[in-house]
């Protein structure tokens, strides 16, 4: 694959990240008159940030004069640079004891604020695992097994979060119901339709009239800035006809077929979140890597089209990459190295496959999370 095409696609991806920067998104939202008034009229104010974007979102709220600030984020992520904030690192993608401890810290904070007070809640994807407290009579192990079975079946993020809410004592607005304080919830959305109650299973979206809830950035926000970057570079952006969803490998093939219809100088842009049906024994990989493999199969033999499929959070599934590049030479190069694309797909060993080709796209945690993106460029 041409290095110049990798660089170009990587630049479009990074422009997408700029469009969903959590600091900027929260800072803009806090200037909304209704939100600004609510903050200044409250007796006491707390800031509660949870999810993969918690650090950046909390930094965007630096201007808020808070009494308490609590951030809950994945282990390995950087802590927010906010003086006085309490930081709790928790488990992702599956909850463990630290997730229960996180829920207890949040419950304690919410219970300590009353009717004249306000809690600014900053919620992003990843919250469902980072903060977990099974409903009464259910163990964490039982809850985890139920979610694992549903995830392995290829369930969507919405279906997974619906189950998580039913099995939880903090999700589905239940955390918010433990306080008399007014709530402002600012959401970085990674779900279809950008429904606030579905992001992170909606722990603070309780449906109270006095509360304010806003989506501050979404998958679409990133696609808009990615399209602007493509235009700035002299390319013509084209939007994929729908949100990407369903089985990752097949969706990658559909996307690549559409890419084959591009004219030279056009960029195809898509976003959403796919699924992967895992076998009992599987290797390292993720949705975006399987999407790229499906795309490679459809592009075989072409010489002027390249694809980048990557997660906006920088970590694709169990892999250590954000995603992968693919083009018409991917399968040819793989076979020369003794790699079998069909076996790779059956065993879900896509990280090893793309690593051997030098086509992994590695960013590390990006500090945001709005789902996945795919870009195709024809030169």
Image (tube, rainbow, N blue to C red):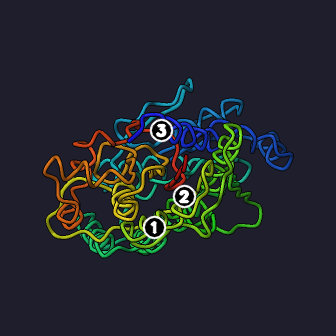
- Figure quadrant of residue 11: top right
* Most foreground residue, 71 or 292: 292
Q: Quadrant of the N terminus?
A: top left
Give the residue number, with chain letter if any, for mark 2. Answer: 190
Residue 310 visible, this angle? no
Residue 350 or 260: which is nearer the viewer? 260
Disc 2 versus disc 3: distance between alpha carbons? 14 Å
Mark carried by residue 157 = 1
The location of residue 221, given as percent across then percent down, is 67, 51
Q: Residues within 10 Å of mark 1 (few under 14, many from 20)?
A: many
* Label 3 Cα crowd, 10 Å radius (few <14 / some 14-19 / many 20+): some
The answer to which of marks 3 and 1 sits earlier in the sequence is 1
Local secondary structure at mark 2 = loop
Cβ atoms under marks 1 and 2 closer than 8 Å: yes
Helix, strand or loop status at disc 3: loop
Please tell me the numbered disc located at residue 145. none
User: Pointers 2 and 3 in contact (CB under 8 A)?
Assistant: no
**Which residue does the numbered mark 3 point to in the structure image?**
366
Q: Earlier in the sequence, mark 2 or mark 3?
A: 2
24 in relation to 189, above or below: above
Q: Position of residue 189 (x, y in %)?
A: 59, 56
Q: Residue at 39% x, 66% y: name it.
A: 248
Q: Secondary structure at mark 1?
A: helix
Q: Is residue 213 visible?
A: yes
The Cα atoms of the two marked residues, 3 and 1, are separated by 20 Å
First in residue order: circle 1 vs circle 2:
1
Residue at 25% from the left image edge and 48% from the top image edge:
333
Distance in Å between CA atoms under marks 1 and 2: 9 Å
Left or right, 285 with reference to 324: left
């Amino acid at each position: 694959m041409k290095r110049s095409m990798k660089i170009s696609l990587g630049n479009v991806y990074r422009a997408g990240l700029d469009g969903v920067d959590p600091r900027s998104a929260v800072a803009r939202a806090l200037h909304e008159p209704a939100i600004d008034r609510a903050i200044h009229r409250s007796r006491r104010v707390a800031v509660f940030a949870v999810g993969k974007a918690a650090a950046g979102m909390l930094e965007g709220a630096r201007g808020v004069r808070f009494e308490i600030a609590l951030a809950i984020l994945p282990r390995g992520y950087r802590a927010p640079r906010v003086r006085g904030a309490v930081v709790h690192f928790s488990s992702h993608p599956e909850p463990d004891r630290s997730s229960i401890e996180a829920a207890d810290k949040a419950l304690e904070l919410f219970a300590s604020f009353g009717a004249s007070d306000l809690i600014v809640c900053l919620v992003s994807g990843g919250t469902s695992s980072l903060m977990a407290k099974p409903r009464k009579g259910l163990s964490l192990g039982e809850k985890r097994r139920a979610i694992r079975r549903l995830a392995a079946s290829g369930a969507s993020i919405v279906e997974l979060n619906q189950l998580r809410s039913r099995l939880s004592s903090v999700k589905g607005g239940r955390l918010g119901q433990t306080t008399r304080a007014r709530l402002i919830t600012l959401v970085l959305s990674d779900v279809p339709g950008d429904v606030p109650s579905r992001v992170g299973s909606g722990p603070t979206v309780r449906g109270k009239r006095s509360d304010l809830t806003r989506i501050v950035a979404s998958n679409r926000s990133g696609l808009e800035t990615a399209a602007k970057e493509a235009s700035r570079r002299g390319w013509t952006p084209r939007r994929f006809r729908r949100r990407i969803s369903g089985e990752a490998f097949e969706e990658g093939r559909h996307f690549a077929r559409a890419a084959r219809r591009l004219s030279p100088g056009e960029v195809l842009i898509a976003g959403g979140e796919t699924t992967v049906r895992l076998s009992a024994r599987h290797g390292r990989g993720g949705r975006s890597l399987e999407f790229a493999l499906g795309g490679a199969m459809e592009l075989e033999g072409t010489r002027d089209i390249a694809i980048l499929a990557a997660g906006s959070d920088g970590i694709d599934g169990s892999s250590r990459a954000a995603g992968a590049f693919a083009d018409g030479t991917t399968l040819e190069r793989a076979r020369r190295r003794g790699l079998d694309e069909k076996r790779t797909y059956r065993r879900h060993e896509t990280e090893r496959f793309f690593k051997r080709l030098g086509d992994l796209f590695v960013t590390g945690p990006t500090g945001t999370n709005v789902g996945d993106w795919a870009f195709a460029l024809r030169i």
